[in-house]
Amino acid sequence: MASRWLDFHGQPAVGLQTPWGDRATVLLHGAQLVSWQTSDGYEHLYCSPQARLNGQDAVRGGVPVCFPQFNQRGPLMKHGFARHLPWQLRSIEPERLRFTLADGAMSRQQWPYAFALELDVTLNPNALRIDLLVRNTDVRPWSFTSALHTYLRVPDVTRMELLGLEDTAVWDAVHDVHGRQAGPVRFGAEFDSVFQAQAQQMLRLRQIGAAQQAAGVLDITQSTSCLQTVVWNPGQTLCKTLRDMPQDGWREMLCVEAASIDSPIELAPQHSWQAWQAFHWNA
């Protein structure tokens, strides 16, 4: 295992490289994982070439940590403040990096509670796991919503399908329609849906019609503490309005997010909540 400090387009970051050749890069800003490359050299995370890498704004791509609010479902800034703040690198272990964030003057301006977060990024051969631990260090209970807002890199989203959500309850946020997913999830226009996660759920992202031996597939799992899976792609029309995305960037990315967002998570003092999302690349 080798780790080193990096300059990622002007921002401080930590790089991790395993003996078998897998690599990861994590910004201190937001503890945001912005790159995961397997030993075959394939980059699995999308990071917009127009992302705002200034140490203050949210970074479009990688794996933003949404806490203590998802999207605009509450009074705080979109997706909460955790992705806007500098985290601390706490430990480097074999194949693992650990980052922490605690409440401070900046967080208390928006949210008057004491908390502690830990984020672990762990590499195994052709595999990545991200663990998030949320701890209430206050004397009062508080509630939150959270997600690991993963941007996956794809060759062309219109030629991809996501398996494993068939017959799952879903809310189509674009059209405000509740229903059940019929068949594999496929993409073309704007897509924004919240799926109710199933126990031992495993998703598979692959190219439509491609045999496994001809094109790799990505298996995606998440902890049972994440009660929802959010799938998002802005599509061509919305993408043109996003200043930190190229106009054709929508074709190269797909968000598959491990989330718990429909109901706030209630956390008593000195109690904790843990969530994870994991990926395995079958080349």
Image: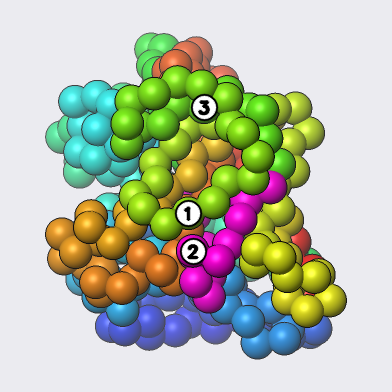
According to the picture, the residue beneath numbered tag 1 turns out to be: 187
Q: Is residue 75 magenta?
A: no
Number of residues whose C-alpha sits closer than 10 Å to that of mark 3, classed few (under 14), some (14–19) or many (20 or more): many
Q: Going by the picture, which residue comes out furthest to the right?
A: 213
Kind of residue sitting beneath label 3: Val
The disc placed on residue 54 is none
The quadrant of the rendering that contains the C terminus is bottom right
Which residue is nearer to you in this view: 73 or 26? 73
Which residue is nearer to you in this view: 100 or 26? 26
User: Could you tell me which residue is drawn at 67 percent across and 35 percent down?
Assistant: 166
According to the picture, the residue beneath numbered tag 3 turns out to be: 170
Quadrant assignment, res 3: bottom right
According to the picture, the residue beneath numbered tag 2 turns out to be: 158
User: If you read the primary sequence from the N terminus, does the residue marked by circle 3 or circle 2 appear first?
Assistant: 2
Quadrant assignment, res 17: bottom right
Q: Which x, y percent locates residue 277?
A: 63, 47
Tell me if residue 36 comes above or below residue 65 in the rendering. Answer: below
